[in-house]
Every structure is written in C-alpha cells, then in structure tokens.
Image (spheres, rainbow, N blue to C red):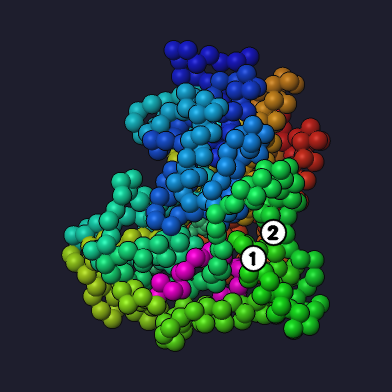
Amino acid sequence: MTKSTSGSNTYDAIVIGAGISGMYFVHRLRAMGMTVRVFEAGSGVGGTWYWNRYPGARFDSESYSYGYSFSQELLDEWEWSEHFAPQPETLRYLNYVADKFDLRRDIEFNARVKSARYDSQAQDWTIETENGKSASAPFLLQAMGCLSAPYIPEIAGFESFNGDSWHTSTWPHESVDLSDKRVGVIGTGATAVQMITEIAKNVGDLTVFQRTPNYCKPLRNGPITAAEQAEIKANYAETFERCNNTFGGFVHGADERCAFDVSEEERLAFYEELWAGKGFSFWLGNFSDILSDEKANETVGAFVREKIRARLDDPAVADLLVPTDHLFGTKRQPMESGYYEAYNRPNVHLIDLHETPIECFTEQGLKTSGASYAFDIVIFATGFDAVTGALNRVDIRGEDDHALKDKRDDGPSAYLGMSTTGFPNMFITGGPHNSSSFCNIPRCLEQNVEWITDCIAYMREHGYSRIEATDTAEAAWTQHVLESADETLLTKTDSWFMGANIPGKKRVFLNYVGGVPTFRAKCAEVAGQDYAGFVLS
Ligand code: NA7
C-alpha cells in the first residue's frame, strides 16, 4: 500500500539529506511506487558539494569513477572536463541529475531536521525540522553523509574577534576577494591542502597554523582530452566493475606483492612509478602490506618525506612540513597540486602549533604562546565530527524513546553499517561501520541505497512492515569491523577514522576496512539469506 502525499505529511519513506545517496533514494523509491519526502538543510541538492565551496575544492577520485553508475543515459550525456573535477562542476553535475530525474519536487529545502522519533504503536517515524515542519513515514532513511558535521574547536575569545571567520564547509556562496586580506588558516588536513594551495595564489598575506603535517601526494590533474573522453565513455562498465573489486572502491587496486618481496632498487622504482600516477595510486595501488606492516610502511614514509623536502626552499619550513609523528597512509592522504610551493612564497607563513599553541582569539586576530597575529579573516579547516557527528546532532529516538547517541558507551555499532537495534525501519547510508566512509564514496553509497531499497521491496513483497537487526548479528558485525581495523596500522594513528579528532569523542574505529568487495559480498549474502540477522515481522 502506498501512502498519499496529497494534502498530508505522511509518506512511505522519509529521507534526511539531499546529497548523493538522498537523491538516489528518491529515484529508486519512486520507481518502486513509493511516496518519499527528503528534508535537506541546504537550499539546493548536492550535500558535500553543496556545502564545501572553498577555493580549490575538487575530487580526489577520478571524475569518471565518481558519478552515478545507475543510468547509461546519464553516463552517455555527462562529460567531465578534468580528471579530478572541481567543486563547481560536481555541483553542476548533481543539479543536472536532479533535473534529469525531476528529483526536486520531492525535496524540502532549507529544512534542517532536528528530531526523529519512532512510535512503536503506529510503527511510524516522525521527523521535525528546525523551521517547524513535521512528517511521518514507516521508513526513515538517514542520508546525512559521513563528513557533514563541521568541527570548530573552542578557542577562547572567539566572540571578541572583529574580523570574519568561517569553517571551510560553510564558505560563503558569494565570491570572496582575498587579494588584500590578511588570512589565517587553522588546520592542514586534506581540505586545507587544497584550499591553501589555491588561496596562496591571490592573497594579501596568509598564515597557516599547523598541528600535524601530512603525507601529501601530487594529484596530477589535467583536462580530459577528446580521445580520453571517448575511452572513458566506452569503458564505464569496466571502470565500475573494477571499483567494485578494489579495496577502497577506486580505480587503484593494491599490488599483490609485499614491499620486501622485491629488491630495494625495484621497490624504489615502483614507488616512483606510483608517485607519477594520478590520484590515490600511491596510497591504494601500493604493495599489499604497506598499511599492515610497519617496516613496509616505513619504506614508503621515507620515500614521501624526501619528496616533500625536495620541494621546499627553506629547510626550516621543510622540517615542519615533513611528517614524522605518524605512519604513512594511516590518515586520509591529502592530494595536492602545488601545496608545498605555496610555502615558498614570501607572503605565506607556517606556524607550528606544537611549539607555540594557540591561546586565544583577540579583537585583531589570534594569539599563540609565541606571538600575536592580526587577521581580516580566520578560516577553520579543522575537519568534521565524522561518521557519527551528523547523526548525533539530530535527536533520534527509537524504541522506548531511547536516544541513538546514548546507545553504546564504547562506540557506535550498526549491522552492516546500515541498521541498528532499537531503531526499527531506520537505515543509514555512510554511517558507522559501513564501507562507504572508507571508500570512493559514491561507489559505496550507490551500493548502500540499492541494498536498502531492495530490502524495502522485499518487505513489501512478503507483507512485512517492520525490520530490525538482531543483537547477535550486530555484535558479530561490530567485532568483525574492529578486528579488520586491528589488522591494519590505521588504529595506531589519531585521525577522524578513529574519532580521535574530536575532544572527548570515544576513540574507536568508525569506518569499515575489510574492503569493498568483502562488504558487498557480505551484504549480498545477508540479502540472499532472506535478510539473515534481521527480524522481519
Ligand atoms: P581533517 O583531515 O580532520 O583535518 C583537520 C585539520 O585541522 C588537521 O590538520 C587537524 O590537525 C587540524 N585541527 C583540528 N583541530 C585543531 C585545533 N584545535 N587546533 C589546531 N588544528 C586543529 O579534516 P579535513 O576537512 O581536512 O578533511 C576531512 C575529510 O574531508 C578528508 O579526509 C577527505 O575525505 C575530505 P591534527 O591533524 O588533528 O593535528
């Protein structure tokens, strides 16, 4: 039975978020004859690509591996202009998709959801938005993204600062002229690396406050030629098939050899070859043991450190930018296109926060333990309360009014990263313990949406109206997720993968690193066994 949308606010499904998965949910659910309403905080579609408008924002995934794969017509029509498309192009693409599939009529914009409550009697979820709207549906689909809750550290005196300040993910929609501005940037993660490179080209004066340097690799972007375009279009099926079968869902798959299977000469030649490659070739196309064997990892780390040092004019600046406090690849590797050269400019300065920590904002700017700095603008490139942050910022109540954020003291748990006990008929894309947060994200989000909508279709076919994961299945999945993470070096480093970038957040692995093929196989197995590990009624 289909719930009517006419004149009521009751639907078959409610989706929170109109990013990549939210948009695809609309398309899939409509095709199943279901009514759906999406609630989106922004004024347009696109999620990550709607919000993150900072200069330099672009893909680190090859463009042609990033778009939706579900529509051949869409693949035929759309042409990416660069190997790694810039944010405005990606946002144009997502708007094109919204137009092509007429998605906007089922999306409520400027509607940030503040709460979602499950009513066991009615077997319905009800959401409320900050602007006073409410709606109900038997299914609640969380599509808020894994890097969508911006994190701004608490720094004393912030209110007293007379200049402008914003987080990279809330960069103003109108253009900002920095050419005569004194700008401070806090943070040197993947976002900051893209942004600093771009704004350094046309800024009055730029001061970067760095806590931890990263192992950045050249992106090696460039325009897509006509011949390449033809090849890309002819090979989409193979590209997506390849992505489904690589560890991280990218076109780059690990080499089967281990680092010490070859001589040092061969090893270095291989590193040079990967370094010359595009995108994540070096991180994800490397020897199979570099993220699990510390000695193998160190050979890579040493190689990258030399590459970085060679690009900096000032050895003292090089000392600060060369990472020594964590293992290569255990944080998300930033991609760069001239990042290090930015520090060779006379108007770009680097401050080491280990030596001189930030003490407070002042009316004029920032004060560290070493000096005071005057700024017109301070930009927070300080990352996100990743994976669980967006979910926790909504008051989500399941059975017996239990809050999702209180569910587990020792970290999140979700069966297949998509469903969690006590929250019937609620599915999550890009949530904790889901492969999508350690993935070429759309590849995994498409899989998430297809799996969830297939599950809903199965329920409707078999007359089920309620689904909930069992405690046993969820506990087993959590154990598998944590064991897979422990087999890697990722858990040794403080990063957003571990929730360790947020003060007070439980330090526990948030993603899934058993690999995309394993994740897909497990999901298919569960579905093939009539949704084993779930109770359907
Ligand atoms: P990241 O990778 O979490 O980077 C955040 C940066 O901000 C990083 O350099 C942090 O230093 C720094 N940071 C965070 N808090 C502070 C404080 N209190 N003081 C100084 N510096 C701070 O976020 P990004 O936005 O760059 O990237 C997130 C993901 O988006 C990325 O993985 C891609 O998938 C896209 P730290 O390293 O913690 O010492």
Callout 2: CB less than 8 Å from ligand 1: no
Task: Find the residue positioned furthest to the bottom.
Answer: 315
Q: Are marks 1 and 2 in contact (CB under 8 Å)?
A: yes
Look at the magenta stretch and give its main secondary structure: loop
* Rendered residue at 30%/46% (across/down): 174
Count up the numbered dots. Answer: 2
Question: Relative to 385, is 256 on the left or the right?
Answer: right
Q: Locate the N terminus and report the quarter of the image it occupies.
A: top right
Q: What element carries label 2?
A: loop
Question: Relative to 26, is 197 on the left or the right?
Answer: left
Q: Does the magenta-highlighted stretch encompass residue 87?
A: no
Q: Does the magenta-highlighted stretch encompass residue 339?
A: yes
> Quadrant location of residue 395?
top left
User: For mark 1, does the 10 Å Cα neighbourhood hold few (<14), some (14 to 19), or many (20 or more) residues?
Assistant: some
* Rendered residue at 43%/28% (across/down): 108
Residue 537 appears in view = no
Q: Determine the CA span between mark 1 and mark 2.
A: 10 Å
Label drawn at residue 252: 2
Query: Amino acid under label 2?
Result: His
Query: Amino acid under label 1?
Result: Gly
| Residue 369 image position (x, y, % from top left) | 29, 79
Does 99 appear above or below 65? above
Q: Nearer the viewer, mark 1 or mark 2?
A: 1
Q: Nearer the viewer, residue 2 or 319?
A: 319
Mark toward the start of the polypeptide (1 vs 2): 2
| Residue 311 image position (x, y, % from top left) | 49, 79
Q: Give the range drawn in magenta.
A: 324-343
Does 505 appear above or below 10? below
* Rendered residue at 49%/62% (across/down): 190
Q: Locate the C terminus and report the quarter of the image it occupies.
A: top right
Which residue is labeled 1 in the image?
A: 277
